[in-house]
């Protein structure tokens, strides 16, 4: 027997409400998210927000005073890219379950979300392209 239309509408509305709640929760989590990373030589520490924006930059232990400009620049870029890659992993892990939601539950595909186009080289440099880590 087929399900009455009212039951299907009620199920769809319940699913929509669950998706809206999950999206609001994900947004709140990402709005508050921050990742901090250091350069390999431990001379620089940076923090980034959920959109990969630099939110803090620190030069540690006065090491910058003895570094050549190119060396300091490389340390800043290294730390920033580490932090951005970790944030990309966090964003994918947070949002990927939402992209899999359909009216009937979890979808086998990512419903057209192309994480590579969103995060570019960050995904190629890390294991994010393989999917979120749990």
Image (cartoon, grey):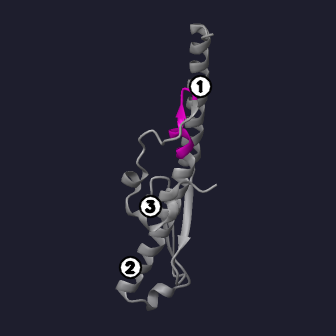
Q: Earlier in the sequence, mark 1 or mark 3?
A: 1
Question: Could you tell me which quadrant the C terminus lies in?
Answer: bottom right
> Going 44% across and 61% down the picture, which residue do you hit?
123
Number of numbered callouts drawn: 3
Sequence order check, earlier mark of 1 and 2: 1
- Judging by the rendered image, the residue that carries numbered circle 2 is 73
Where is residue 133? Give x, y as percent: 60, 57
> What residue is rendered at 40% in x and 85% in y?
71
Vertical placement of residue 99 versus 85, above or below? above
Q: Which residue is mark 3?
A: 123
Q: Which residue is mark 1?
A: 15
- Mark nearest the camera among 1 and 2 is 1
Residue 17, by quadrant, is top right
**Residue occupying image coordinates x 54% and y 70%:** 37
- What residue range appears in magenta? 95-104
Q: CA distance from mark 1 to mark 2?
A: 49 Å
x then y, percent, for residue 121: 38, 63
- Depicted 119 relative to depicted 27: above or below: below
**Label 1 close to label 2 by CB (< 8 Å):** no
């Amino acid at each position: 027997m087929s399900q009455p239309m009212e039951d299907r509408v009620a199920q769809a509305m319940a699913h929509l409400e669950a998706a809206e709640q999950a999206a609001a929760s994900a947004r709140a989590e990402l709005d508050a998210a921050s990742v901090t990373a250091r350069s390999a030589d431990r001379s620089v520490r940076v923090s980034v927000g959920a959109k990969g924006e630099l939110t803090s930059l620190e030069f540690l232990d006065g090491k910058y005073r003895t570094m050549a400009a190119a060396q300091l620049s490389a340390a800043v870029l290294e730390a920033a890219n580490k932090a951005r890659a970790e944030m990309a992993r966090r964003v994918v892990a947070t949002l990927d379950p939402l992209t899999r939601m359909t009216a009937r539950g979890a979808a086998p595909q990512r419903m057209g979300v192309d994480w590579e186009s969103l995060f570019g080289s960050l995904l190629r440099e890390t294991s994010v392209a393989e999917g979120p880590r749990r």
